[in-house]
Every structure is written in structure tokens, then in C-alpha cells.
Amino acid sequence: MQFTVSALLLGAGAGLVAGHPSSLFHSNSKHAEAAELAKRASCTFTTLSAAVAGKKSCTAIVLNGIAVTAGKTLDMTDLTKGTTVTFEGTTTFGYKEWDGPLVSFSGTDITVKGASGHVIDMNGAAWWDGEGSNGGKTKPKGFYAHSLTDSTITGLNIKNTPIQCYSINGASNLKIVNPVIDNSAGDVTDGGHNTDAFDIGSSTGVYISGANVKNQDDCLAINSGTDISFTGGTCSGGHGLSIGSVGGRDDNTVENVYIANTKVINSDQAVRIKTVSGATGSVKNITYSGISMSNIAKYGIVIEQDYENGDPTGTPTSGVPITDVTLKSITGAVVSDAQPYYLLCASCSDWTTSGIAITGGKTSKSCKGEPSGVKLC
Ligand SMILES: *[C@@H]1O[C@H](CO)[C@@H](O)[C@H](O)[C@H]1NC(C)=O
């Protein structure tokens, strides 16, 4: 038997039933009762096949030390409404060149959490070649949080993602609390690349708090979506807190974003908004507040409307206006050959700035199209 079921008989004192769930379905007359019981069941799975086969019959799932077969997804999609999934022990993944994802969740009213001492170790070093998703080995994506509604992911400890970690898409009212992503082992020559921590698209209501991220690309990248917050985080080693690139996808609207009280250290930039050259869309009602930075290698604050497949063209376009932006209490230092501010706007308006003090670096090479009343550089 590959898994055990223990069902707590709610409302019936301390009754405890243990056995294979199929035994609950032997009697037709008891079928409805048994089905109800199975839904309440708590299941501990120690193999991938048992977890995938049994996920629908349990609403309290424990994934204990699962070694995920190379080329397979730890598939927790389409869970029963109200399910709780707890990671225990070390979750590992075999090596294969494929697109992934390594882990995938979907459902409504889902709670995902980690037991004390657990780690989801994605074995990134097996794939890392310094090329990320631009070439070299085909690398699997990490953690799909797609179509998760009214759900919470709390305290997951993930390390060594081959490329991007969380892909959040089609989510609605999703909270991610105290997530840890440690890709610092990828800080080597030909190591981790494109290891974005959180990529958000086409979602409404995504609230990330207390993130602790060490990686080599965006800590946060919002490509589209509304009502998104990222608060109380620490981002180290990567590309900072990004909106964009926006434009050129199916969904090109980013609205109502609140990014606050976050430290960005040892990163290429701290605050970044980039829209795609020649594309259409909109970036609206964006707040960055209480952002502190140190050892920033390229730009403290960079907002540019000239992005093109990784390369800025140098000429901003106005198809994705950036409006209603608040930049408040953004402080810290960039390295000596970095630029504190870089602004390349063709359509930027209704911004307010206060308490911005970034030291170090050299005079900004570009400060084009500052909205009226704003004097960053
Ligand atoms: C702007 O976004 C914030 C979230 O940062 C939200 O609370 C507020 O309601 C939005 N304002 C408008 C006018 O939608």
C-alpha cells in the first residue's frame, strides 16, 4: 500500500478510522456516508504516483519526502475545494531536459503550506549553464500557481530552481505568505539565469508578503494583472522589483499595484517599470513605497518605454502609458558606475514622488519625458 488514510470522525468524539479508502466504498447503502468521510480524510503520500492518484479523495494532504520522477510534474491541479496540502521533509526532482513545471497547483479555497524543516529542492545545478531560458539545456519551470482562487500558500521553502520559480497566472485572490526562495547556489559562473522568483500574469488579487528571495533575475515581475501587492520582502542577487515588460502579450494591462517596505540588495536594479517598444497596453495606479536599496549595480529606479526582447531600443514609444505612479520613500545606494535614475518616457503622466534619496553612482545618461512636476534626475 502506497499511502495511508486516517479519517477523523468529526463530531463523534475521538473516533479514528484507518484503512485503504476503497474499503470505505464496499457497501452501497453506506456510499454517501463513505464519500463524505473520504472527503474529510487526511492522507499522507510518500510517492508521486500515490499523491496524484489520491489527491481528489482527500482534503488534508501531506506530501512527505516525495522524490519526483524526472520529467514528471508534482501535479496538485484540480484539487477538491477546501483542500490543505502540507509539504514535509525534502521534496526532490529528477533531472531531465523538459519544460516542466516541476510543481503545479490549482483549485479553490486551497491552502498550501510547509511543515517545519521542509524544503522543496528543485536541483537547479543539474540544469544551470548560465543561459537560463535563452539557450543551452531545456529547463523546467518551477511552481505553477495557475487558476488558484481564494487560496493561500504559506511558508514554502524552495531552493535551486532551474529557471523561473513561481508562475502565477489566472489567479484570483491568492495570498503568498512568507515564501523563501534560495537560489544563491546559482551565483557561480555558468550558474542560475532567468531565475525569476514571482512572475505574475492575468491575475486579479495577488498578495505576496514577507518574501525572502535570493536569485539571479526579477524578484517580482508583473506582466499583467490587477490588485497586486508585494510587501515586507527582501530581494537579493537579482533584478529587483519589476513591472513588465508590459506589451505584446494577450493581456497588457497592469493596474493597482502596491509594492512596499521591501529591501533590495546586491541587485542590478531596485525599482523597474518597462514597457515594450511599439506595443499597446496600460500601466496604471502603481505605488512603490518604503523601498530601500544597497549595492545596486545598474539603476536605482529605471522606468523605460523602449523595451524589446531583453534589449532597450533607446527610443521610447507611447503605446503603453505609465500613469498614476507614486514613488515614495525610496532610499539607499547604487555602486559607483551605476546610475541612480534612468527614465525614458514617451507617455508618462500623473506621478507623485516624495522622499526619494539614492546616493552613489554617476549622472544619469537618460532622463527623457519626465512627467510634469517630477524631478528625479
Ligand atoms: C489604486 O491601487 C491601490 C492598491 O495599491 C488601491 O487600493 C486603490 O483602490 C487603487 N485606486 C483606484 C482609483 O483604483
Image (cartoon, grey):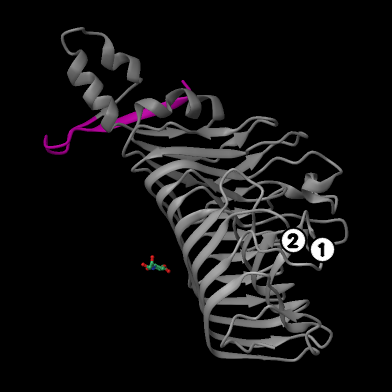
In the foreground, 275 or 189: 275
Residue found at x 36% / y 20%: 20
Q: Secondary structure at mark 1?
A: loop
Residue where numbered disc 1 is placed: 313
Q: Is residue 11 visible?
A: yes
Q: 246 left or right of 12?
A: right
Q: Is residue 87 above or below residue 260?
A: above
User: Any magenta on residue 6?
Assistant: yes
| Ligand 1 quadrant in view | bottom left
Q: Is residue 291 above or below residue 358?
A: above
The answer to whether marks 2 and 1 mark residues whose Cβ atoms lie closer than 8 Å is yes
**The residue stretch that appears in magenta:** 1-16
Residue found at x 73% / y 58%: 277
Q: Position of residue 188 (x, y in %)?
A: 83, 62
Q: Position of residue 208 (x, y in %)?
A: 47, 61
Q: Earlier in the sequence, mark 2 or mark 1?
A: 2
Q: Position of residue 290 (x, y in %)?
A: 51, 82
In the foreground, 291 or 93: 291
The type of residue carrying mark 2 is Tyr
Where, quadrant-wise, is the C terminus in this rendering?
bottom right
Q: Is residue 114 visible?
A: no
Q: Secondary structure at mark 2?
A: strand
Residue where numbered disc 2 is placed: 307
Q: Callout 2: 10 Å neighbours few (<14), some, many (20+)?
A: many
Q: Callout 1: 10 Å neighbours few (<14), some, many (20+)?
A: some
